Amino acid sequence: MRLALVADEYAPSRTSVAVQMRDLAAELAGQGHAPTVIVPAAGLSAPWSTSDEDGIEVLRVRAPRAKDTGHVQRALAEFRLPYAMRRGLLQSPHADTRWDGIAWYSPTIFFGPLIAWLKQRSACRAYLILRDLFPDWAVDTGVMRRGPAYFLLKAIEQQQYRAADVIGVQSPGNLGHLANWAGQGDGRRLEVLYNWLGNSGPQKVTEIPWLVELDGKTVFVYAGNMGRAQGVDCLLDLAASLADRDDAVLLFVGRGTELPELRRAAGDRSLTNVIFRDEVEPWELPSVLRRCDVGLVALDPRHTTHNIPGKFLTYLFAGLPVLARVNPGNDLIDMIDSHSVGYTSTAPSGAELADRARELLADPDRRADMGRRGRDLAVTMFSTDRAARQIVAGLRTESNGGAALQ
């Protein structure tokens, strides 16, 4: 199939969407399809540029800068995004391309008009890879209120859903949030599309000098975004609770809007068992995790939706047991508990996490057993091969409206 893959970031960016889409594109190509990645690019001197990147055609289209800007500037850029990309596409070598299928990644929620236009021109099906339910999670966590801005964003969200023939949510618990969409039209399909993780970049042991600081320590690692949705501040409570253990350290690797505040708070609380390191390349992360002992997950407990973060998959593939503080009822709780790959807590503070952390500190054999089960789970449930085949099946086959994969 000739496939268009649309996302707002792609390699060499190190964000989860960029890494996942690179892995997906490579897998689709390996299965005999012809994917073209279409991605916005701020600052291009021409309306478009195309390149072959590891055997994948990548079409970058000039668009307003929507990352690392102020809230107002970002909002304006996001609104303009689909129309700017349409203009660039019409000037590109793919102006007249007819696609056999389109798959796009959300967030962002603003691609709806672009996808609807591409879908109409090609008379093909479109698959929405839906990774979070924005703007609802922003209301849950207090980032915004249910005012005019919220309802405007809800309208844009619904516009995106209308462009889709299939929507793949990342967790069974999120199926109910889209039940109305699934019942509104023949051929619509709502299903669970689990996150995936492939081989991003060269697979080799990378020498990282600062890892020597961890010698002799049991390392609890948080690797990934540190933003409002995560509620990572609870992990500082965990660090404080383990302050008496000179054999344990918490390592934070990544970036995010809350990182400066976390650094400040750790300093104010004199937490000497906390280390912060900048984001590393995807192919360097395995070397970091190889030196760690437990993977940490944090989600704001006020969430009412379900989330299986990419970092969870990363820990499983690395053979690390998982210690997670999540929102009550999250599907991640049953997944971790039923497969015995770690421990979970829904408590607002880190006190309960500390009890579980001490159990893991005291029992290396238990950590190893959980890690082995985690690798088995990752290969079975979160492979790129599985995700690619599921997306292709959704693009090829019309099904009864409202059907759902559990």
Image: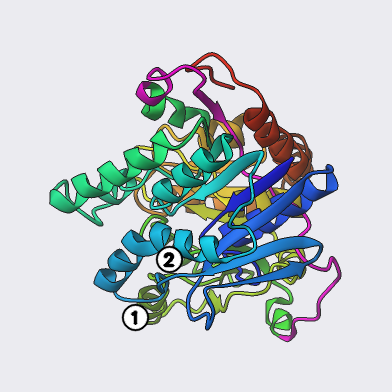
- 166 or 44: which is nearer to us? 44
Q: Where residue 220 appears, x then y in whole percent?
A: 61, 62
Amino acid type, label 1: Asp
377 in relation to 25, above or below: above
- Front-most of 327 and 90? 90
Label 1 crowd (10 A; few <14 / some 14-19 / many >=20): few
Horizontally, residue 27 falls left or right of residue 168, namely right
Q: Amino acid at mark 2?
A: Leu
Specify whether residue 188 is painted magenta.
yes
Q: Which mark is residue 236?
A: 2
* Mark 2 residue element: helix
| Residue 401 place in picture, x, y as percent | 49, 16
Q: Give the residue furthest to the bottom.
A: 209
80 falls in the magenta region: no
Boundaries of the magenta span: 180-209
In the image, what residue occupies the spot 35% across and 75% down? 261
Image x and y of residue 25, in percent: 72, 52
| Circle 1 SS class | helix
Q: Is residue 12 left or right of residue 190?
A: right
Left or right: residue 157 versus residue 208 is left
Colouring convention used in this rendered image of the protein: rainbow
Query: Which quadrant of the view contains residue 269?
Result: bottom left
Q: Is residue 320 visible?
A: no
Q: Position of residue 100 (x, y in %)?
A: 66, 38
Does residue 193 appear in this view? yes
Residue located beneath label 1 in the image: 268
Q: Residue furthest left?
A: 147
